[in-house]
Structure formats: structure tokens, C-alpha cells
Image: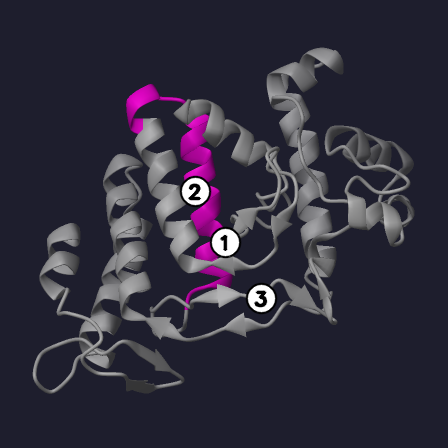
């Protein structure tokens, strides 16, 4: 049951197939249509689930998902000082999900004919859209998988590595193009409790995946929390934003937990 859930979450539209990271939650049973907001605590706790699945099964797909979640967190959710931002909004230009959606005509302009056809087939892109709102408004699509990469390779009469390699080149190109769009607004508050979750996730991943970079990220965030969010009486403040910390007394002192995780 756990593996079925994790695998279908990763295939669904709740996963950002172009830029990585999980959206806040799915509004349907098939994991297709998300609320497009991205929350720090989701990245932390979901990555822990994939990390534990990797530990138990040895399935590298789970480890790859963890690494890609952290690619997103490092790129888009990490402050210059080392703390982690809270969230990215669902809306851009006044429309929910717009930043993440694609039309067939747009893909045909951006990619070669063969690459556009390949991407549309793999990611289940349709001329009239692949979700209800998309079918009603301009034929927009949420990229998602319906098959495993092994099944797709078999159906396309190629091996899995070649299929993934071709897809990755297209994904990078679309990611770079998408970066030119108007981004959803970022909630740049740094919350002590949510940072604790992300520190814990990075610390465990550093050991399980043998990634020294994750140790550094956990330590940097812990140092930020224990310095910039430390109250005069030794407790932790709730949040900081642009160098100003506040809301004392709403969180206990979790420094012993943070240090215990990264020792």
C-alpha cells in the first residue's frame, strides 16, 4: 500500500515533473489535479517517506525522488543565510496553476516536432487539455505519467535509460523556458518548526544517501535557527523575515533536537 501510494504520487500531477517538488495536496483520487501551492513542510515530510521506502526496498526511484525534492528546496526555498522559506503560492498572473500548465500549441512552438510529440505522449498532453478546467479554458495540461518508465520504454521499443535520457533533455529545456514566466509569489518567512522538519529530513538523507551536501545544508539551517531565531531567554522565536525575528513563546526550544539530528 505504501509503495503504491508513493509511486502514484510521483507519477501524478501533484509532482512537478518539470521543476520538481510536491504541490500541497491532490483534489482527486488519481493524484492528477493538485492545489498548486508548494509548502516546505510537505517537502520535508514527503521526502522522509520516500527516504524510508528507499531504505527498506533499495529501490533507487525513491532515492531519486528525494534528491529531486532537495534540488527544488535548495534552488527555490533556501535563503542566502541558510534558512528555508515557507511556501510558494498556487497563483501567478491571477490564475491558479498557470505557471505549471502547458498547451500543445505552445509545446509545438518550443520543441522540435519529434520532441513535442514524444513529450505529449509520455506526459499525457491533449489538444483540448487533460483536466476539467483546462478543457474549458484554452486546452491547458498538467504533465503527468500514467505508466512506469519501464512500461513506457517497452511501448516505445527502447530501453529505459534511453527513454529517461531523452525525456531529461526535454525537461531541462522546458524548465529553462518556464523560468522566464512570471513566478508564483514566494512566502519568504522562515519558521522555526518547519525548518526543524526540513533540517531533520536533510540530516537523515545525508546518512542514508551518503550525501555530504545535505549535512552542510542541515547544519547551515540549524545555525540560522539557533542564532537568528534565538530569544534572549534561550528559547526559540516562531519566525523571521528579512532579518526581523519575532513571536516569542509560541515554540519550545528545539535546539537539542536539531543538534541531535546532525551530530
User: How far separated are the C-alphas under marks 2 and 3?
Assistant: 23 Å
Image coords of residue 84 (percent x, y): 38, 66
Question: At 25% from the left edge and 43% from the top edge, which residue is drawn?
Answer: 204
Out of 147 and 204, give the one closest to the viewer: 147
Is residue 206 found inside the magenta-colored segment of the image? no
Estimate how packed mark 2 is, as few (under 14), some (14 to 19) or many (20 or more) residues with alpha carbons within 10 Å.
many
Question: At 89% from the left edge and 53% from the top edge, which residue is drawn?
Answer: 138
Secondary element at image label 2: helix
Image coords of residue 225 (percent x, y): 24, 72
Q: Looking at the image, is mark 1 or mark 3 earlier in the sequence? A: 1
Secondary element at image label 3: loop
Q: Looking at the image, is mark 2 or mark 3 earlier in the sequence? A: 2
Looking at the rendering, the stretch of residues picked out in magenta corresponds to 55-78
User: How far separated are the C-alphas under marks 2 and 1?
Assistant: 9 Å
**Horizontal side, residue 69 vs residue 28: left or right:** left
Question: At 16% from the left edge and 51% from the top edge, which residue is drawn?
Answer: 261
Question: At 61% from the left edge and 16% from the top edge, which residue is drawn?
Answer: 150
Secondary element at image label 1: helix
- The quarter of the picture where the N terminus appears is top left
Residue at which label 1 appears: 72
Q: Is residue 181 depicted above or below 262 in this figure?
A: below
Is residue 77 found inside the magenta-colored segment of the image? yes
Residue at which label 3 appears: 89
Main secondary structure along the magenta-highlighted residues: helix
Residue at which label 2 appears: 67
Image coords of residue 186 (percent x, y): 54, 71
Out of 159 and 234, give the one closest to the viewer: 234
Amino acid at each position: 500500500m505504501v509503495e503504491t501510494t508513493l509511486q502514484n504520487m510521483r507519477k501524478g500531477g501533484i509532482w512537478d515533473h518539470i521543476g520538481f517538488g510536491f504541490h500541497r495536496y491532490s483534489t482527486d483520487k488519481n493524484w492528477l489535479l493538485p492545489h498548486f501551492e508548494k509548502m516546505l513542510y510537505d517537502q520535508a515530510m514527503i521526502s522522509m517517506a520516500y527516504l524510508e521506502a528507499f531504505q527498506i526496498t533499495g529501490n533507487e526511484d525513491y532515492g531519486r525522488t528525494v534528491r529531486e525534492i532537495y534540488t527544488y528546496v535548495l534552488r527555490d526555498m533556501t535563503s542566502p543565510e541558510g534558512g528555508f522559506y515557507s511556501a510558494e503560492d498556487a497563483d501567478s498572473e491571477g490564475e491558479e496553476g498557470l505557471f505549471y500548465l502547458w498547451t500543445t500549441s505552445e509545446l509545438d512552438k518550443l520543441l522540435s516536432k519529434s520532441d513535442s510529440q514524444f513529450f505529449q505522449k509520455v506526459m499525457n498532453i491533449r489538444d483540448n487539455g487533460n483536466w476539467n478546467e483546462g478543457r474549458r479554458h484554452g486546452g491547458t495540461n498538467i504533465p503527468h505519467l500514467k505508466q512506469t518508465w519501464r512500461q513506457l520504454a517497452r511501448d516505445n521499443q527502447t530501453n529505459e535509460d534511453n527513454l529517461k535520457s531523452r525525456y531529461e533533455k526535454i525537461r531541462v529545456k522546458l524548465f529553462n523556458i518556464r523560468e522566464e514566466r512570471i513566478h508564483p509569489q514566494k512566502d519568504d518567512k522562515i519558521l522555526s518548526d518547519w525548518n526543524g522538519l526540513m533540517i531533520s529530513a536533510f540530516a537523515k538523507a545525508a546518512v542514508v544517501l551518503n550525501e555530504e551536501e545535505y549535512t552542510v545544508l542541515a547544519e547551515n539551517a540549524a545555525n540560522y535557527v539557533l542564532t537568528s531565531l534565538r530569544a534572549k531567554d534561550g528559547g526559540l522565536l516562531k519566525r523571521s523575515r528579512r532579518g526581523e525575528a519575532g513571536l516569542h513563546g509560541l515554540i519550545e526550544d528545539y535546539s537539542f533536537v536539531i543538534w541531535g539530528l546532525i551530530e
